[in-house]
Amino acid sequence: MDELINQLMSYLKGAWKYRWPAMLAAWLISISGWIYVYQLPDSYRSSARVYVDTQSILRPLMAGMALTPNVEQQVSIMSRTLFSRPNLEKVLRMVDLDLKAGTASDHEKMLDQLNENITIESVGRNDLYLISSLNENPKIAKDIVQALLTIFVEGSIGDKKQDSTTAINFIDQQITEYEEKLVDSENALKEFRRANIGILPSEGTDYTVQMLAIEDNLGKAQLELKEAEQSRDTIKKRISGDEPTLATDETLGQSDNPEIDARIAAQKEKLDSLRLNFTEQHPDVIAAKRLIAILEKRKAEEAKLPNNKHDPGKNYSPMLQQLYVDLSQSESTVAALKARVAEYYRRHEELKSKSNAILEMEANLARLNRDYNVYKNNYEKLVERREAAKLSDSLRDTSELMTFKIIDPPTTPLQPTGPNRLKFYSMSILAGLAFAIGLAFVISQIRPAFNSQGDLREVTGLPVLGEVTRLSTDQEKIKEKKNLYAFGLSFLALLIIYAMLLTKVMLM
């Protein structure tokens, strides 16, 4: 510890020898710094606080119907891009600073200076912003803040207009293309239906469903036909077991049964009525003709019966007449069912013979319907998106979605806000003193001197036998005191000048 103290004292003694060059350097640096700071022009700061109200009632009302813009993000991006070169050039034009730029270099310097002297920051909340500007002219500082407010408001409202127009134009182009595809698909589907109108499946059915339906109907008709034939055969057996007495040879060819004649006449009248509405191939027409033929055959058979003359009243037995009526109805039912079975069988064979063509046609129809549905769905979605885009564009243009409220408008400052001369004056004297101490130390190291026996012994490595004390005369002592007083007064004068500068700054 003693060695460290001795070493420090040695450095101080060495630097003290060169105190006047150090004092001169301190004066030069301090006075130069003070003069520079004193000549700095005053700067004035103007600021404004603006509140961005993004809580609009339109946003929840239009949710799901239109794409509402992210207002908070839009304002945040605008606040970060406010200092872009186009905006700075616009500010220069709005406050007429561009008129002072004679050359391109001056214009660039103005842009750089403007970028350094304006600030925008969020104050307390994300939707409260402070915009400020620093300038030598208080009126220009206020005008710059007002221009920044204008750009901030206009930019936040109208940034996305071009993007919305581009999106709507693109959707319109896609709608036109899909509309053409949809029309072509509709025409192809219409032509296909016209070309295959005879073999197209019914609505909601295909070949397999049609085949199963025809087979099911054919099976039911065949079952009903068997039941009707069994019922007819049973009636015939009952009639044949009755042994009725029929007419003799003299009455052969004649019929004395008015009931059969009446029935034949009724069936013929019914046949004429059916022919007015149906063709000869209709099952009801075929059944009526067959029933007439059966009745006429019965009439001829009754005329040939041999024992008719012995018991002519036997043929008119009520039970036998009822059996004949039931037989006629059964014959009619059997005939109708046979016609139905034949028709279903024909349809079945026809559908079976066209199976390959129908399956191929169904595959083509499914493909056409699939393409049509895809084009139709995409077309409807594009139309819906276009309307949503237009609604979003109108919603973005409205001023109700985002409201700007200027809480503190910009004003012309009366007192300068800079430069901070108190700080700069202090930094100047501190820099001068630091440089003076460093200079004295450097000179003492360049021109070293031995201040004690220990320093000499340590450097030379030789034993020191003794030392000679320097004795000063009275005149030399007075001169040394004056030198010391002059040095102190020089330092004190430097401090007094510093204090006067500080007093002046605080009184301004």
Image (cartoon, helix red, strand yellow):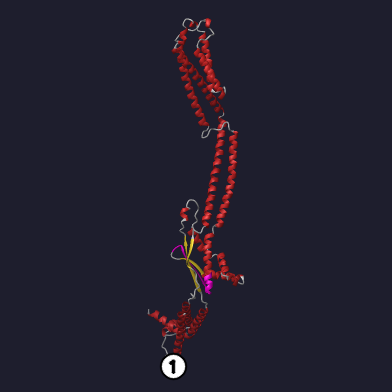
Outermost residue on the right side: it is 103
Which residue is rendered at x = 58% and y = 41% of the image?
185
Quadrant where the N terminus sits is: bottom left
71, above or below 413, in the image = above
Question: What amino acid is at disc 1?
Answer: Ile
Quadrant of residue 101 within the rendered picture: bottom right
Frontmost residue, 212 versus 308: 308
221, above or below 82, in the image = above
Q: Secondary structure at mark 1?
A: helix
- Region in magenta: 125-143
Which residue is rendered at x = 45% and y = 66% of the image?
123
- Residue 245 sits inside the magenta stretch: no
Which residue is rendered at x = 51% and y = 79% of the image?
37
**Badge 1 density bin: few <14, some 14–19, many ≥20, Cα 10 Å:** few
Frontmost residue, 442 versus 460: 442
Q: Where's residue 492, x and y in %?
A: 44, 85
Q: Where's residue 52, x and y in %?
A: 47, 62
Q: Where's residue 419, x and y in %?
A: 49, 76
- The residue indicated by pointer 1 is 478
390, above or below 125, in the image = above
Frontmost residue, 121 versus 4: 121
